[in-house]
Image (cartoon, rainbow, N blue to C red):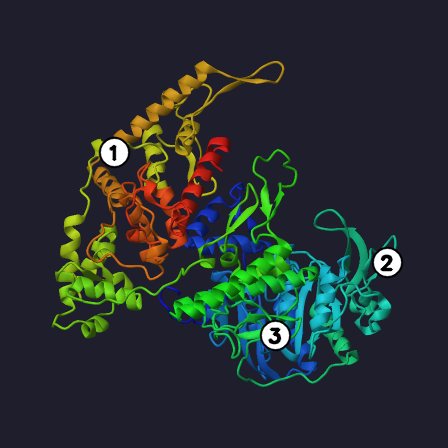
Amino acid sequence: MRASGGTADDTQRAVLGRWSGWGALPEVFDARSNALRRQAERVEALLSPDEYEAARSSTINAHYTSPEIAAQMWAAAAKAGFSGGRVLEPGCGPGVFMATAPPDLDVEMTGVERDPVTAQICALLHPGATVVASPFEKYHTGGFNLVVGNVPFADVTPHDPYANGAELVLHNYFLAKSLQLLDPGGLLVAITSSWTLDALSPDARLELARHGRLLGAVRLPNGAFEDQSGTSVMTDVVMFQRRREPLEMPKRPALWDVDPVEAWYVLNGGDDDTPSHNRWYAERPELVLGEMVKGRGLYGRDETMVNPRGGDLAAQLGEALAAVVDTAEIDDVPSGLHRRRPNLAAGPAPADGDEEQAVVRPPPGGWPPWAKEGSLLAIPGSRKFAQMVAGRVVEYTPKPRSDTNELRRVIAVRDAMAELIAAEAADEPQGHLDGLRRWLNVTYDTYAQGYGPLNRGTADRPAGDDDAPTPRRRLPKMGGFAVMDPDYPAVLALEVFDPETGRAAKSEIFRQRVVRRPPAATSIETLSDAVVASVAALGRIDVAWMAEATDWEWEPADLATDNVAYRDPAQAGAWEPAPLYLSGNVREKLDEARAAAEHDPAYEANVAALEPIIPTDVGAEDITLRLGATWLSIDDIEEFICDTLGPVEDLVVTYSPAGGWNVEGVNWTRATEAQWGTDRISAISVVEHGLRGRPIVITDRLADDRRVVNEVATAAANEKLEAWQAELHRWAFGDDPERRTRLLRAYNDTFRSWVAPQPGPTALPDSRSAPPESSRACWRPRRVEPGRSRLRRGRRRRLRHPDDHRRGCGRRAGRPLRRLHVDPARCRHRRRGRQPAGDPGRQPLRTARRRVRHHRLHRRRFGRT
């Protein structure tokens, strides 16, 4: 259905409606389990790598709700005053709550689901709903009137700087963020783990109480969802109403400091028969749908358990929720469909199946134009701080509060640096730049005198590893600036810091200009000049811009005719410079060009340019083929084993990036077993060692339980392994011409398709390059081109080839060029002895060489890490 792009008919909807998630099938993703081996292989073949990983990670919490329970929760929301509007189902799964929404309510449903496969099923089942395939941590659009659903349970802490500052575990985080996504007065009706109310620490409940007022809770018995999703955990149905404004309360308030209605975070002491549980249930036992007893939980510890009463659980839940609503004090619930508004870090409205939401908003009026998403700001005229969140300014509290003064000073350093860089980029007058540079020196000196270098840190060895040769450095948090502000790395780069001595020196920006606009093209005489000028001005090849910039007549086809640029059919016909297009996987590009030329003759120039540069195929005599070759398929290995040994019972060959190769099967043919194995190791095991690239070592156990290597048996086994290697080459390229042709084609397509980029007349400049006076070091040409290529292409495409990265060619020394954004083509060739020792232009070179020496010394001492 995904491939056809159609909608689901009734038969298909019935099949999709039986989907209950991956939570009940963790064995499918367990490489150590043989119970569902065949099904596991089929699942891995059907899903993409990203889909497979998302499905595997969802097994711990993909447990869904029965429709009868969901219907009662909808009824409770309607009884509490919800009459329609925007509804969010976080962790929606296949959309059980979407399917059970009352038909008389006018609702606009939005579901958020992490697993892309389940999200696609939900979108097919509910085409009128908005289904976002994204982790809940990346969903920030608010303005909902109701949140209803079954939140996932897990003892993990999601990273969400906007909604999880309290570091709540997964189910509590879902509840807290859902409350924040509601409009004031909105309702939350959700199923959560019983540990939300029964955990010994009240911190999570206090965080929930800050944003919402508990209307009530009903405890379900153990096993309420066992038939639906195979889980027997104990759960609660909780109802909250979002407050108009968040409460300000101490971290652990005493009972007498809180209104009794709000004291639901307190646990009852319990007794010998009943463990401690929330005071809400101690005072309202009728809201426990069963008998509360002490029992052994999932991990063998004493836990509160509820034995079911028997009868219709959904009806019992409906009665209990109705009683909760009747006794609760509920404010007016907002309703009606209205324009969504950002509530946390809102992005644009998502489309069906979006994997992520973009959060790109300009700063509001009155704030610096260089402020970014997440930037921390000091509010002028007060001691308060703010943070940029989705184009809005929200209040920020330093973490910890004792670092408030340090946070204010480091923000001053950041502001001075950002203003100076922005002024240099805008080409402000030199006098203005000098004033900003002096102010940067003042703010930095003030910070350094009070707190020390920005890069200071303390040595911190990993826990339980006192012998670790290289302790980690723990940097200061700076009141949360190190974690929250996106400019933190840039602030650290203001210093040239030596971690061994702890000394810091100011970088070049404190002394001279580091940002300068690239010079504009003064004359355009050829198409190559026009391409360079277009990329320098716009960042891309724009034919219309080039036509206006040139004073002669030419056609776009002339770019390909003159070997200057080509249209790339893989990028919707966008123009690419010739050195970039005529490199990389040229066989793949040739196939794309030939396919495009069948519909558009303009691509024939691409075919003509690519055909001469295709690498020559190699023959079988030039190929060293060994077991474990990555270009051989699993089917090839299975066929090779069967052809060599004869029929093998239950032969299964598997491969995974994490577990490597695995071969299982039994060879009952004695003749082949003696020929390809030994009396100490079977032929199947010999093959498996070869596939894994491991030599065979056979040991004997002595009387004192020590094991020693049996040299004779080990040598005999490795001789059999070499025989297998030789037989593989003969089998692949021997008597079967069809197999020989197929494998030769596979090898050449895999390893003889890559062409290194060749610098040509359209080598592109980099607008981020440092000014000429700050890049006077001399670099050899073989170190120059990789750095220029990386700056030229950014992260869009990385071309690697063994011929470009031979050992000793200087690739490691060229890496600092890319990090420092230094254009080596502007280096002035000077003899080292004639450069002044204090020349600041040598700083990038000195930093690069110092890093290289440090890494080489570390490798000599401790090896590769």
Judged from the image, the secondary structure of the residue bearing numbered disc 3 is: loop
Give the alpha-carbon distance from disc 1 to disc 3, as whole Å: 70 Å
- Residue mark closest to the camera, 1 vs 3: 3
On the rendered structure, is 420 left or right of 215? left
Image point (69%, 57%), residue name: 233
Image point (57%, 45%), residue name: 502
Whether residue 827 is visible, yes or no, is: yes
On the rendered structure, is 212 left or right of 669? right
Q: Amino acid at mark 3?
A: Pro
State the image quarter where residue 623 is shown: top left
Whether residue 64 is visible, yes or no, is: no
Give the alpha-carbon distance from disc 2 to disc 3, as whole Å: 49 Å
Q: Amino acid at mark 1?
A: Ile
Q: Earlier in the sequence, mark 2 or mark 1?
A: 2
664 lies above or below 558? above
Give the alpha-carbon distance from disc 2 to disc 1, as whole Å: 74 Å
Q: Earlier in the sequence, mark 1 or mark 3?
A: 3
Residue tagged 2: 269
Discs 1, 3 touching: Cβ within 8 Å: no
Residue tagged 3: 380
Judged from the image, the secondary structure of the residue bearing numbered disc 1 is: loop
Tell me, for residue 623, which label it has, or none: 1
Residue density around tag 1, few if under 14, some if 14–19, many if 20 or more, within 10 Å: few
State the image quarter where residue 617 is shown: top left
Q: Earlier in the sequence, mark 2 or mark 3?
A: 2
Q: Amino acid at mark 2?
A: Gly
In the foreground, 813 or 42: 813
Residue density around tag 3, few if under 14, some if 14–19, many if 20 or more, within 10 Å: few
x and y percentages locating residue 595 in the rendered image? 20, 60
